[in-house]
Image (cartoon, helix red, strand yellow):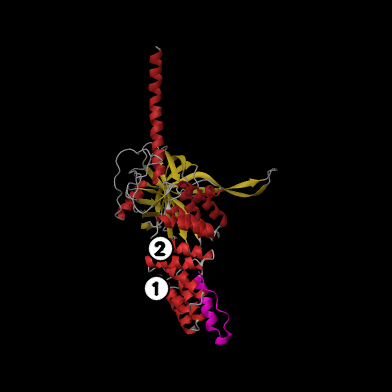
Amino acid sequence: MFHRLIATVLCALLPAVALASQRGDVFRHAKASTVLIVAVNETTHSVSLGSGFFVDADGLLVTNAHVIEDSQRLHLYVRDQFVYSTPEVVAIDADLDLAAVRIKSSGVDALILAEDLPAEGTEVIAVGYSRIQDILQMGFALHPTISTGTVGGVAEGRSRANGRPVSFIQTTGVLNFGNSGGPLVREDSGEVAGMLVQTVPFLEKARDQSGAAIGSVRMQSGIGYSIPASVIRQWLSSHDLIPRPISGPPRAVRSDDRGWSGVAQVADRSFATGHLLYTIAMAIHEDADLLNLAIRHYEAAAARHPDAPWVSRNIGLAYASVGRWNQALAAYLNALKHTPYDADLHTDAGFAWQRTGHPAPAVESYRAAIRLNPHAGRAHNYLGTLLMEKGQLDDAVLEFHHALESEPTSALAAYNLGLVLEAKGLREDAMATWESFLQKGGAVPDQGGWSLKIREAAARLKHAADPSSVTAVPTSAR
């Protein structure tokens, strides 16, 4: 009798255990398929953060157009451990608010786009990187969030650019900014029901202890709208982007399950978190607090991977950004032990030697970079500044010419070339160099504001009535 009771209890529990296991697999697979997208606008010094998800095992992913459309640079963070800095934007549609991006990789975790609209009451999860910047500033590492919700039905809305009538899936649940572009996944099948595009905020009255209104607070209503998976399917098909079919249920994802190929920098979560913080900090005028947070995470990664050159290189860049040049130099030299044929790394090491007061090894590092890559524009430019400081003006002119030939849109190289020509007394040549650059490439945004400096220097020469009255020549810039 007792054994029969135990068997009855086990039979009752097994379906619940199996359902919990399946639900866990759906959650893990959805998280592994979702990526963080960081879009940098170098003109406005702003960063857009959003989510996206793979729809093809060969690296095709989709997101919202509004996440990436105003950016010059994109970084994708996959599985919170892999950084892709040169993804290809395959297609973008501002009206439907859809974009397709591809990375060079194979075997990525991808989600299946459902063919039909979900029924009312369907349980769903929203996966994404909501409020990720706030989370990082609290000291936590990079990780996605999952919010559960329920489908309320299909709601008629308007397309983003042209105002055409379009349908959206309405859901209720806890949703936040940063979920944009992430998948809305059915709990029962693991298929994508839609892509989250917007949530509904509202203003709540804030009151003091006596109950008097003291202002308003922006709140999230828990109501969200998603682009149906069927619309995404049709849009991809119209661009000849047919996701490779994926058969079978979502597979369980292990924390050590990599299976990646391509050019991604493989690193752990600490490295990816440091890279993300550094990217945001440099985009918004080198924010010191974010840079120091980045260094903390890089140092944690370096403790786990002391001989990984990509970790040493990136922590060196972070140290350099906060003026810790001795530590930056040590990091670069450690990286060079493992990647001695990296021209950019030799250039970074040379600049660190220069900033720590060692011009001789700096020159050697720059020349090593140029031997490895004759078109290393930064190395030519930095070497030119050293030669100019030593009074070797003819050699400096050659280096700045090489720098500008290697990078024709480099305002920094054009500025320095004009300065050294002016220092040689060739003011007409300096003016011609600056005016030619402004005509050809002066409209290209540059992070250091060198185009503006060129305009100011050209105006100074142009308005100098007497050559002898020209003020002292500025020091070359790095």
Q: Which of the 4 image quadrants contains residue 71? A: bottom left
Name the element at disc 1: helix
Magenta stretch, residue numbers: 450-478
User: What residue is shown with label 2?
Assistant: 343
Q: Left or right: 212 with respect to 430? A: right
In the image, what residue occupies the spot 32% across and 46% down?
Answer: 107
Which of 193/410 is in front? 410
Q: Is-magenta flag for residue 378? A: no
Label drawn at residue 405:
1
Helix, strand or loop status at disc 2? helix
Query: What amino acid is found at the position of numbered circle 2 in the picture?
Result: Ala
List x then y, in percent, for residue 403: 42, 71
Residues 334 and 267: in front is 334
Q: Is residue 284 left or right of residue 235?
A: right
Can residue 404 be seen here?
A: yes
**Residue 415 position within the rendered picture, expressed as x and y whole percent measured from the top left:** 48, 74
Residue 459 appears left or right of 19: right
Disc 1 marks a residue whose amino acid type is: Glu
Looking at the image, which residue is at 49% across and 68% down? 360
Q: Residues within 10 Å of mark 2 (few under 14, many from 20)?
A: many
